[in-house]
Amino acid sequence: MSGARAKTFERIKNYRVHLGSQLDLFTAEELKQLEQIVDEIYRYPLLPSALEILNRQLRLQITDRGLVALLLNLKKDGRLCQKIEPEAQEVQLVCSLGLNAGNATSSFALAQTRGDDLQLDLKR
């Protein structure tokens, strides 16, 4: 994580610790919402529009409470993070080996694996 995402994550994490030391009926619900926001920011990339908004607000030195309110509104509107479905996160392994013997160049590439499915490309 870097930039606005990392700064936001750290500020919310620190605010959550501060809020946890003042537990009462109202902070318990806010802590639950903060946990969801921290988890979402950690797992998924921010949407470009959310990144712009956060960069602008961080430059303007938004308060922690204001930042939380902003994040809650962005999350509620579905404008905070780009959630990627598990099926779309396929594992891709690419290996290559190049051999040069005089004028002949050979290369070997392991293209993509899906479960037990293995595709092999040999090029000469």
Image (cartoon, grey):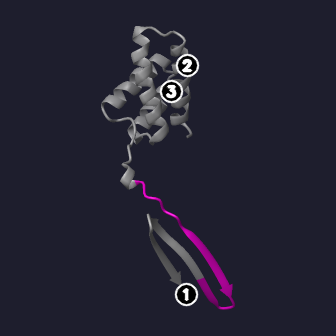
| Left or right: residue 7 compared with residue 74 | right
Q: What element carries label 2?
A: helix
Q: What residue type is labelled 3?
A: Leu
State the residue lying farthest toward the front. 116
Q: Distance between the residues labelled 1 and 3?
A: 53 Å
Q: Within 10 angstroms of label 1, few (less than 14), some, or many (20 or more) residues?
A: few
In this rendered view, identify the residue nearer to me: 101 or 122.
122
Q: Which residue is label 3 attached to? A: 58
Residue for point 42% across, 32% down = 53
Q: Does the magenta stretch include residue 15?
A: no
Residue for point 58% across, 80% down = 107
Q: Does the magenta stretch include residue 99?
A: yes
Instruction: Pick whichever of labels 1 and 3 is earlier in the sequence.
Output: 3
Q: Within 10 angstroms of label 2, few (less than 14), some, or many (20 or more) residues?
A: few
In this rendered view, identify the residue nearer to me: 10 or 111.
111
Q: In which quarter of the image is the N terminus?
A: top right
Residue for point 46% across, 17% down = 65
Residue for point 40% across, 35% down = 50
Q: Quadrant of residue 29?
A: top left
Q: Distance between the residues labelled 1 and 2?
A: 59 Å
Q: Which amino acid does label 1 sit on?
A: Arg
Please indicate, yes or no, whether residue 29 appears anywhere in the rendered image.
yes
Q: Which residue is label 2 attached to? A: 17
Q: Which residue is label 1 attached to? A: 124
The part of the chain drawn in magenta is 89-106
| Left or right: residue 86 compared with residue 62 | left
Closer to the observer: label 1 or label 3? Answer: 1
